Amino acid sequence: MRPVIPHVGSLMARRPGCLSLAQGMVGWSPPAAVERALRELPLPAAHRYGPGLGDADLLAAVRQELAGLRGLDLEGSEVVVTAGSNMAFHAAVAVICDPGDEVILPLPYYFNHVMAVQLAGGVAVPVQAGLIPDPERLAAAITPRTRAIVTISPGNPTGLVTPPEVLAAVNRLCARRGLFHISDEAYAEFVHGAVPHRSPGAEPGSGGHTLSLFSLSKAYGMAGWRIGYAAVPRQLIEGLAKVQDTVEICPARPSQRLALAALSAGPAWCRPRVEALGRSRRRLLAAVAEAQAAGLPLQLLAEPDGAFYALIEVASTLGAAELVERLVLEHGVAVLPGGEFGLRGRPGAAVLRLSYGMLAGAELDEALGRLFEGVRRFTPR
Ligand SMILES: Cc1ncc(COP(=O)(O)O)c(C=O)c1O
């Protein structure tokens, strides 16, 4: 598996002025408190190694956020700070999997989850369980080698918020079958519709088998500072500490100071920004409807209500990967091919993932215009 983001990045470098509906980032900068914290970094402590699982004050703030705001049942859990939530996922599967152990990834998956499981010597098992995963179909995929089930809500690449009762059912399934539930909640703040986001780790008694992974990258516009945090079952903490010690030694200490400042700004700071994204979402939905009305053979796989993604399927003479290359190089707009998320599309059709996190207003309209014009060129006559 070739990492897709660097590949699309190298294509974009060949097409100056290319607009990106590809990478999962937001367009905003972190809270002012983060910039203040940056100017006031406590030196020389920030130059030195710190505790492997994170600095004590940030861990305390994280614990408070998880137990308070998110209502997690931390009985049986420990908290840990990592270099982004990708690092937490990587460390988790490295600890959970012996070679050949299986991790169930409902389709569509997030490509880095597949790569992390493979790096850990495990087997990623994609399961067709519906865009909102059906717990019974997940149950049917469990084998004696299964160690964990992964959910992502709000979803990448689906842009769907999984209803709390479904996440709770997956969580109970994991408990019953002696599995870990790895809940990727990088987009926890990004809800645009009626379905709320609720951590499955908030289910009473879930702490001993649930890994709840969070990120500062999206909500606080801090992707480059590489900080995430997680609640993990206590039985895993020794293994996780070993991975952290070996891979990161400690999370970057200057970034941890900034993370503390970001958490103090809290979700109230994120809310108006997420609302603005909601307006971009509506713009995207309107543009799709307009393109359909104009006869373009494309459809949304589902109406997105979370994160900042949408999946479209379009009748195409090209496969999704080639279509994406031509869109970048010949039309100046980047999206991601569905195949990277395990979505093959129907014969004669290509699935594309659109991210509306980075563009807004006229720029978003321009990018969508380029996309639909490009796609039209490759529809069957
Ligand atoms: C589902 C999901 N998890 C994790 C990440 C990575 O987050 P972080 O920057 O905290 O490593 C992403 C980034 O796109 C994501 O989509």
Image (tube, rainbow, N blue to C red):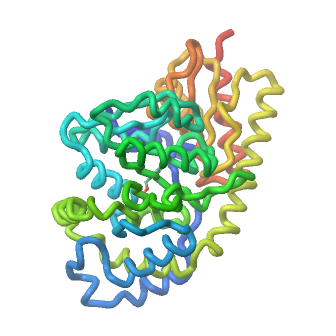
Q: Left or right of 2: which side holds 199?
A: right
Count numbered badges in the picture.
Answer: 0
Q: Quadrant of the C terminus?
A: top right
Q: Name the residue at 55% across, 56% down.
A: 187
Q: Is residue 64 above or below residue 110?
A: below
Along the line of sight, the residue nearer the viewer: 30 or 213: 213
Q: Name the residue at 24% across, 42% down.
A: 119
- Say if residue 180 shows up in the picture: yes
Q: Is residue 124 above or below residue 240?
A: above
Q: Is residue 83 above or below residue 349?
A: below
Q: Position of residue 13 (x, y in %)?
A: 43, 44
- Taking the view exactly as shown, the residue that stands out farthest to the front is 176
Q: Left or right of 325: which side holds 237?
A: left
Q: Name the residue at 26% across, 87% down.
A: 45
Indicate the quadrant where residue 370 lies.
Answer: top right
Q: Left or right of 233: which side holds 120?
A: left
Along the line of sight, the residue nearer the viewer: 295 or 366: 295
Along the line of sight, the residue nearer the viewer: 4 or 181: 181
- Taking the view exactly as shown, the residue that stands out farthest to the top is 381
Indicate the quadrant where residue 348 lies.
Answer: top right
Q: Quadrant of the N terminus?
A: top left
Q: Position of residue 184 (x, y in %)?
A: 46, 52
Q: Name the residue at 70% across, 39% down.
A: 303
Q: Position of residue 242 (x, y in %)?
A: 18, 62
- Say if residue 10 shows up in the picture: no
Q: Position of residue 86 (x, y in %)?
A: 37, 54
